[in-house]
Image: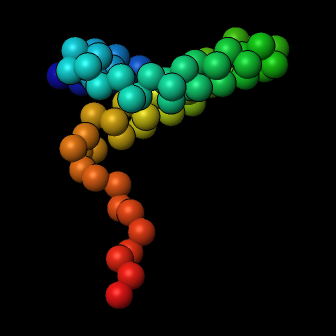
Amino acid sequence: MSRKVTSPLTLATVLLNSLMAHSRFEAVPWLVAVAAGYGLTLYLRHDSFTQVIQTLGVFASVLLAVCAWFSWRDPNREEPGPAPTV
C-alpha cells in the first residue's frame, strides 16, 4: 500500500489559485515578499544541492502559511478600531 505525500508547495499553489480566482489581491504584497526573500536567500546560500533543497522547503512552507492565512481569514471582517470614549 503506497501513501501519497503532498508537498507544501503543491498545497500553496492550490490556495494561491483560489485566492487569485476570487480576486483576493490583498495577499500579493506578502507573496512578493516571500518570493524576494526566497531569491535573496538562494543567492546567498547555494553552496550545495542540500542547501538549495532546504531553502526551497523552508520558503514553500512560508508560502503555504501566507496563502493559508489569506485563504481562511474573513475578508469582510472590520479591523478593530480605537475604543469609544465615554
In the image, residue 7 sits, relative to residue 49, either above or below, namely below
Q: Nearer the viewer, residue 82 or 17?
A: 82
Please report the residue visible at 20 percent of the width from the left and 21 percent of the height from the top.
Answer: 22
Q: Quadrant of the N terminus?
A: top left
In the image, residue 17 sits, relative to residue 34, either above or below, namely above
Q: Examine the image and state in which quarter residue 17 appears.
A: top left
Residue 43, visible in the rendered structure: yes
Left or right: 50, with 60 as reference point: right
- The picture places residue 27, in percent across and down from the top left corner, at 41, 28
- The picture places residue 20, in percent across and down from the top left corner, at 29, 16
For the rendered model, the colour scheme is: rainbow
Left or right: 71, with 85 as reference point: left
Q: Residue furthest front?
A: 86
Q: Examine the image and state in which quarter residue 5 appears.
A: top left
Please report the residue visible at 21 percent of the width from the left and 44 percent of the height from the top.
Answer: 76
Left or right: 3, with 29 as reference point: left
Q: Nearer the viewer, residue 55 or 28?
A: 28
Q: Residue furthest bottom?
A: 86
How many numbered marks are there? 0
Q: Residue furthest left?
A: 1
Please report the residue visible at 43 percent of the width from the left and 34 percent of the height from the top.
Answer: 66
- The picture places residue 29, in percent across and down from the top left corner, at 51, 25
- The picture places residue 11, in percent across and down from the top left corner, at 32, 24
Q: Quadrant of the C terminus?
A: bottom left
Residue 60, visible in the rendered structure: no
Please report the residue visible at 44 percent of the width from the left and 22 percent of the height from the top.
Answer: 28
